């Protein structure tokens, strides 16, 4: 399974990061971009890049794409793709509320 990846880096280091990724993944089609490099990779390659790259700040996997102008756009996009209302916020803390957490 091939995943669209982006590896961000410090400004001015893109060329060095592209060289590093080509050394780690010789068969990868690496595209240098402003602020990092883009490529397609497998989950195994994501782990390899995450462990071996010294210049990438992180390894990002693109999970959605679309226009984005405001914070609510990402919520609405997720709601449209999952069939859930965008106005409802999910919480991971279950029944814990600020008052009961302070006790």
Image (tube, grey):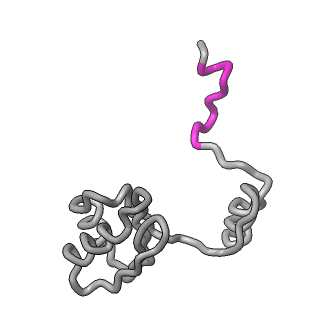
For the question of whether residue 89 can be seen, the reply is: yes
Q: Main secondary structure of the magenta part?
A: loop
The residue stretch that appears in magenta = 92-101
Residue 93: say if magenta. Answer: yes
Image quarter in which the C terminus is found: top right
- Within the image, what quadrant is residue 97 found in? top right
For the question of whether residue 84 can be seen, the reply is: no
In percent of the image, x 23 and y 59: which residue is there?
51
Residue 41: say if magenta. Answer: no
- Within the image, what quadrant is residue 49 found in? bottom left
The picture places residue 36, in percent across and down from the top left corner, at: 42, 67
Q: Is residue 64 left or right of residue 73?
A: left
For the image shown, how many numbered marks are present on the structure?
0
In percent of the image, x 76 and y 51: which residue is there?
88
User: Could you say which is closer to the camera, residue 90 or residue 70?
Assistant: 70
In percent of the image, x 27 and y 73: which residue is there?
21
The picture places residue 15, in percent across and down from the top left corner, at: 34, 71
User: Could you say which is closer to the camera, residue 42 or residue 24?
Assistant: 24
The picture places residue 30, in percent across and down from the top left corner, at: 35, 81
Q: Is residue 53 left or right of residue 61?
A: left
User: Could you say which is closer to the camera, residue 69 or residue 78?
Assistant: 69
Q: Residue furthest front?
A: 12
């Amino acid at each position: 399974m091939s995943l669209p990846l982006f590896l961000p880096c410090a400004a001015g280091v893109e060329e060095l990061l592209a060289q590093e990724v080509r050394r780690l993944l010789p068969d990868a089609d690496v595209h240098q971009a402003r602020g990092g490099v883009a490529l397609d990779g497998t989950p195994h390659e994501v782990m390899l890049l995450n462990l071996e790259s010294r210049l990438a700040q992180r390894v990002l996997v693109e999970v959605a794409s679309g226009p984005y102008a405001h914070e609510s756009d990402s919520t609405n996009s997720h709601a449209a793709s999952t069939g859930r209302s965008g106005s409802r916020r999910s919480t991971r803390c279950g029944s814990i509320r600020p008052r009961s957490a302070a006790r």
